[in-house]
Image (cartoon, rainbow, N blue to C red):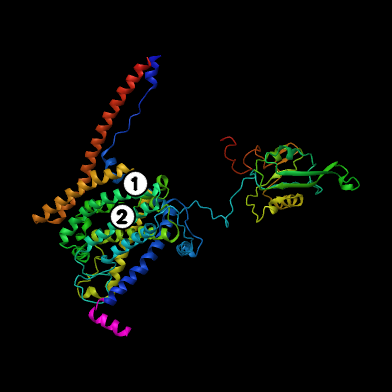
Amino acid sequence: MSNKKTKTVKWGEEPKLGMLDALYLPAIVSGLATAVRHAVSGKPTTRQYPEVEPEIPPNYRGVHRLNRDEQGRVKCVACYMCQTACPANCIEIIAAPAPKEDPHWTDRDKYPATFTIDELRCIYCGMCEEACPVDAIELTSVYDLTGLTRKEMIFDKEKLLSVFDETVKTGKDPVRTNRGTLGPASEEAPSGRQGPPPPGRGKHG
Amino acid sequence: MLKTLINELVEKWPGLWPILAAIAVILAVVPFLGLYMTFIERKLAAYVQDRVGPNRVGPFGLLQAVADGLKIFLKEQIIPDHVYTVLYFLAPTLSLMTAMFALVVMPFGPVPTNYTGGFRFIVAPGIDIGILMMIAISSLSAYGIIVGGWASNNKYSMYGAIRSCAQFISYEIPLGLSIIGVIAVAGSLNIEHIVDAQSKSIWDWNIFWQPLALLIFFTSALAETNRLPFDLPECEQELVGGFHTEYSGIKFVLFFLAEYTHIVTVSFLTALLFFGGWSCPGIPSPSTPEGASLTYMLLGLLVLVLKVSCVVALIMLLRWALPRFRFDQLMGLAWKGLIPLALVNLIGVAIVLSLDLPKHLLFVTAVLPVIAAYYSATQFNESMTKLNSERNVLSKSRAMSYE
């Protein structure tokens, strides 16, 4: 026992100070050489942001959107799963029975009469997307959301649908899941087709 | 009435207009230079750190300095409740005033030693105490910092001011000692004469026979300007902002300008005292008749400015190459390193001058720091071995107590 103790206590010894170390000058010169080498390398890593946009990975959690189905209707079935899952309480849905007299809506029972998300309260955790059983609510790679008032940051159904139209048009945000099948933008999708894995995820995380 | 007064004044004092012109040049150029040095420093820092630096205002960001200046002029004046108001306002002015006042005897272009009249690149030509006055005045700038730190009535500012005081007092000594050799060979305190003594050939530049003095001078001068690695009076990590924590707006700018004026002064002094000032092979000395022509004057000015910009660039690069000293290391470097070295160097100069030996023998003094380094390394290693053996004894006794 005591033998083990003496073995575990070990003092690290400082390296011996050489003459050149005490002279400071070689270290200063090498430091200056490093500084000059970087200064003349001419390869800045700065990204000129407004002109050059960053490459956002497709599984980035940005502004929400409400997906449309093949017939252009809102996919949401007003099941309140996202509203329940939301830890920030930023989703508010008012459900209504689907208009059965309309031939387009015969296969649906319920739909959201209103669907509002307070983008300022949202913490962009993506739990609404995980909770959604019909892949209706998704987070997009839109990262530069700004507004002048708090009111205009509360997105209603029309606004969220228009976010879908815009992001689908640019092609940057494919639908992430489709009835249990992972799309190219989902986090667990095979790598290669998506951007770099987010920090803390993936095989290196 | 006014016209006759001016005429009489000029008649009695023919050097008035040239002096006023030189003062105007300094007053116009130095703030501008200070403004643009911040820009150059930011750019240089950015390049060293693989960034781009300010590039939005104007072409290549060249108007950034102007924008910064304008912004800071329009800033609100915040005067904290707890400051000593009179001293609080006095400190930045004192700081900048002393920094600018030191420039009075500094030639910023070729100045002939046989001064007669007309415009010269110096406010006060032919001052025989030149360099002495410069050092005396620039050491007064410690007052600006100390008064600022005291008036701020804030412990961090006070710490910064105290540090700066100790630093100034310590580094004044090697600074003064290191240039005595230069003065001794030139036989004059007058900066024009010191440069003139170096103007015969490139080998007469003081760097080639006083390399050690240059090293000591440059190190202490860096400490005097509060630049990294000696910026302990204002290190952000420990002291918020040091002595200028409580200052904002234009008062902060005055401190800032004073600091950059110090850098300009130090760079000019380094170029003038050790790198031959405006002398350059091919350009005749301004004291000779053909060297006094306008072309050669302007060429000399260009040479001096080039040398000075090299020194400024070096100072700015050093900031990104070196970590900050610890305070005891800072004091140790001055008292245990630079002052003894400067004294030994001085003895060497005295021996060479009194025995009439060729002054280039003094290049051997470059070996002195190596010897000093060897000595300090052995000392350090010995003390470390002692410490380690003490620790071993301690750890063994601990281990025994575990049993």
Residue hosting label 1: A30
Residue B308 sits above or below residue A73 on the image: below
- Seen at 14% across and 51% down, the residue is B348
Please state which of residues B395 and B242 is positioned toward the viewer in this rendering. B242
Q: Local crowd at mark 1 within 10 Å, few (<14), some, or many (≥20)?
A: few
Q: Are marks 2 and 1 on the same chain?
A: no
* Residue B79, x across and y down, in percent: 45, 57
Q: How many marks?
A: 2
Quadrant (top left, top right, bottom left, bottom right) of the N terminus of chain A: top left
Left or right for A152, reference A101: left
The chain letter under disc 1 is A
Magenta highlight: main SS? helix
- Residue most extreme to the left: B355
Left or right for B278, reference B74: left
Q: What residue type is labelled 1?
A: Ser
The chain letter under disc 2 is B
Task: Evaluate whether residue A170 shows in this view.
Answer: no
Which one is closest to the eye, mark 2 or mark 1? 2
Residue B84 in which image quadrant: bottom left
* Residue B391, x across and y down, in percent: 31, 26
Q: Local crowd at mark 2 within 10 Å, few (<14), some, or many (≥20)?
A: many
* Range drawn in magenta: B1-15
Residue B52 sits above or below residue A116 on the image: below
Please state which of residues B6 and A72 is positioned toward the viewer in this rendering. B6
- Seen at 29% across and 70% down, the residue is B299
Residue B11 in the magenta stretch? The answer is yes
Q: Which amino acid does label 2 sit on?
A: Ala
Residue hosting label 2: B142
Task: Evaluate whether residue B159 shows in this view.
Answer: yes
Residue B110 in the magenta stretch? The answer is no
